[in-house]
């Protein structure tokens, strides 16, 4: 169940538009800083999906553009742009997904980042509007995975134009 606590009121269920079919598990919540809450879930078949609602709304709605994506992190920028970091989950590889208005687009990843190998990802915007990101990778590809394989960090990257990546 999802609960909310309106100011100066008791806790109440917040389930409008939320389906309990397939026994979903809530993986986490994120927000874009503009009044939109995102609830990241997976069903009993471990297929991830995302619901969203505005804090002024009472109904959760699905975000089709984030279906099958396992959200690791989200950051919002002052101009309303949000970026979701996703990780590899067997259905889709890790990605950075930019939301501008109602449009969702993939951001090209820095060189050396293999989408199928992303096991964790973090994103943040700084005060200049630059997007910063960090990835951890495990060598799932090429297959077979070497027996001595370990998960490694891929370094810190930033971009001001969502295409040209630099290291600090």
Image: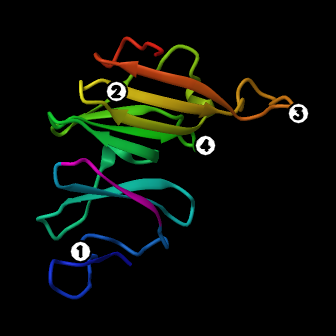
Q: Are marks 1 and 2 in contact (CB under 8 Å)?
A: no
Measured Cα–Cα span from mark 1 to mark 4: 30 Å
Q: Earlier in the sequence, mark 2 or mark 4?
A: 4
State the mark number for residue 16: 1
Q: Earlier in the sequence, mark 3 or mark 2?
A: 2
Range covered by the magenta-colored residues: 26-33
- Could you classify mark 3 by the number of other residues whose Cα lies within 10 Å: few (under 14), some (14-19), or many (20 or more)? few
Q: Residue at x 77, y 34 (%)?
A: 150
Of badges 3 and 2, nearer the viewer stands: 2
Do tag 2 and tag 4 residues touch (Cβ < 8 Å)?
A: no
Using a 10 Å C-alpha cutoff, classify the residue at mark 1 as few (fewer than 14 neighbours), some (14 to 19) or many (20 or more). Answer: few
Looking at the image, residue 36 lies above or below residue 20:
above
- Which of disc 4 and disc 1 is earlier in sequence? 1
> Distance between the Cα atoms at labels 3 and 2?
35 Å
- Res. 130 image quadrant: top left
Q: Secondary structure at mark 3?
A: loop
Magenta highlight on residue 6: no
Instruction: Specify few, some or many for label 2: CA neighbours under 10 Å numbering under 14, 14-19, or 20 or more.
Output: many
- Indicate which label's residue lies in the foreground, 1 or 3: 3
Secondary structure mostly taken by the magenta-highlighted segment of the chain: strand
Label 1 sits on a secondary structure element that is loop
| Horizontal side of residue 151 vs 71, given as left or right | right
Above or below, 56 relative to 131: below
Q: Find disc 4 in the rendering and name its residue.
A: 90
The nearer-to-camera label among 2 and 4 is 2
Decide if residue 135 is on the left or right side of residue 1: right
> Between marks 1 and 2, how big is the CA–CA gap?
34 Å
Q: Is residue 137 above or below residue 2?
A: above
Residue 147 numbered mark, or none: 3
Residue pictured at 73% horizontal, 23% vertical: 142
> Label 4 crowding class (10 Å Cα cut-off): few <14, some 14-19, many 20+?
few
């Amino acid at each position: 169940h999802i609960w909310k606590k309106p100011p100066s009121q008791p806790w109440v269920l917040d389930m409008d538009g939320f389906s309990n079919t397939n026994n979903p598990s809530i993986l986490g919540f994120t927000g874009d800083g503009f009044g939109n809450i995102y609830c990241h879930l997976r069903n009993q078949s471990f297929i991830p999906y995302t619901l969203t609602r505005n804090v002024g709304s009472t109904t959760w709605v699905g975000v089709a553009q984030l279906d099958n994506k396992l959200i690791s992190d989200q950051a919002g920028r002052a101009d309303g742009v949000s970026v979701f970091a996703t990780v590899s989950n067997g259905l889709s590889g890790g990605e950075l997904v930019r939301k501008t208005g109602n449009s969702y687009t993939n951001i090209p990843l820095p060189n050396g980042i293999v989408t199928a190998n992303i096991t964790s990802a973090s994103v943040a915007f700084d005060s200049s509007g630059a997007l910063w990101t960090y990835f951890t990778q495990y060598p799932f590809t090429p297959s077979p995975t070497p027996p001595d394989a370990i998960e490694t960090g891929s370094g810190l990257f930033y971009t001001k134009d969502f295409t040209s990546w630099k290291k600090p």
